Structure formats: structure tokens, C-alpha cells
Amino acid sequence: MDEGPRSRIRLKFARLEPARNMTHLEQLKVLRSRAVASGLKYRPAKAGAALMPRMAFGPAISVGYESLCEYADLYLDEFVKEDEVREKMLPLDDERFRLASARRIPVFFPSIEAAVNAAEYFLEGTFPAGFSQAAVDSFAALKSVPYEKVKPSGERKSLDARAPLLSASWDATAGLLKLTLKLSPGGNVKPEIVAELMAGGRPELKRILRKELYWQDSEGKLVVF
């Protein structure tokens, strides 16, 4: 009788500059290949599909972003210490992805995507003249900011670009805008769109970094994932 996977390892990766133009699906393929190459005795995604490890991933990342918080849960058919997982995964680091951590979690824990409530972004670049912390605060003080999202299919959807904003700060010296945005099905607004509406014009961004993912505790406080 199949008793299911013996353990579940939560891997955290940094997505570096050479990987920023990868699609989400291309990224998943790379991380699955990395799991296969590690030599760990993984759980197959399907019976008879030995080269496809059973894995679960965090929220999709947009093309053009870098990240310090790309997650992948790997299901194993053996009990493995966290240090052993790191030893087998670290040699696979390259210029695109770097392992940040590996920790064992309960096999039947909620999925990453279901547990994540918010994301923090760093946006670096040149912003319209006059942009300041006061402009950030003014945007945050608004009750709503209507925004029409146009999907690649041409479908249009009306959203409130103010609703996802949990916190924001501006570092004029570094040209760095920090945004923490709530993640909710059907209500997500990209950080560059929030930045544009906040600044009253499109900034020339040289880097967008997804810095952290968060979940909310029972008191509504954000906790690093």
C-alpha cells in the first residue's frame, strides 16, 4: 500500500538577473531539473513518470523581475536531513538561481500559494520630477484608485489599485521605492503599475525585485514566509 511521500522539503531560491526574463513555466522547468540532478530520492509527480518530481511552487513571478524569495516544495520518498538536502542542492547553483535555504515542513502543510498573503517589492530607477515621500503618503491616504487592467487577450477588468497597498516608502538618494502589496485572487495589481499611479507618470525602472513573501497571523500581522 502506498503511504505517500516520507518528507517535504521547502526550498527557497534567489532568482538572479540572468533569469529575470524567464517565464514562470521556464522557471518551473529549471527547478524541476535541479531536483532531478540533486540525486535526492524524490516522489514522482505521477506513477511511471520517474523524471518528473512531485513539487509545488509559490506565486508566479512576472517576466522581468528578480527575486530573493522563489519557493519550491519537493516531496521525497525518504527521510533526509536538511543539511544533506543543502549539500546536494548547493553545487547546482548557477548565475540564474541560487539556493537560499532548505527546510523540512509537514507533508500535509497548506500549499505555498494558498498561504501567501502579501509580497514586498523593491523598485529601482528614475522617477518623475518632484516624486517624494509626500506623494507616496498622498496615494496611501486615498480610499480608492480606479485602474483598468488589460489582459493579453484584450479583456478589460476594473480594479482598485489602492486596495492592495499595505505599506510604501521612498528613498530618494537610492532611487528606491519599496512596496508591500496584498495578494488576492483576481485583485492583484503589479508593483510597477502602483508606482506609476503613485508617481503620476511612468518611472524608468532598471530593476524590480520581489524581496519577501508574507503570511498574516491571527492578529493580522505580516510574518516573513
Image (tube, rainbow, N blue to C red):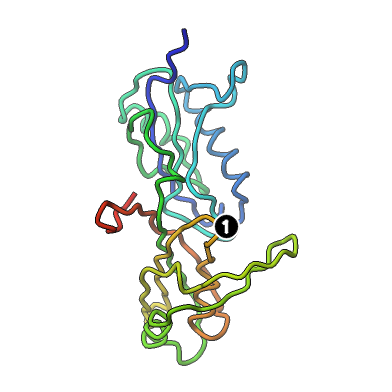
Residue 166 locus on image (x, y percent): 37, 68
Residue beneath the point at 31% across and 53% down: 224
Q: In this rendered view, identify the residue nearer to me: 140 or 210.
A: 140
Residue beneath the point at 43% across and 64% down: 181
Say which residue label 1 marks.
62
Q: In this rendered view, identify the residue nearer to me: 111 or 87.
A: 111
Crowd rating for badge 1 (residues with CA inside 10 Å; few <14, some 14–19, many 20+): some
Figure label count:
1
Residue 186 locus on image (x, y percent): 56, 58
Residue beneath the point at 37% across and 29% down: 85
The vertical placement of 190 against 63, above or below, is below
The vertical placement of 184 against 225, above or below, is below
Residue 91 locus on image (x, y percent): 44, 35
List the single residue furthest toward the top: 1
Residue beneath the point at 34% across and 49% down: 225
The vertical placement of 119 against 85, above or below, is below
Residue 217 locus on image (x, y percent): 28, 52
- The type of residue carrying mark 1 is Ser
Left/right of residue 117 with respect to residue 153 in the rendered view: left
Query: Could you say which quadrant of the image residue 167 lies in?
Result: bottom left
Query: Could you say which quadrant of the image residue 29 lies in?
Result: top right
Label 1: state its secondary structure.
Answer: loop
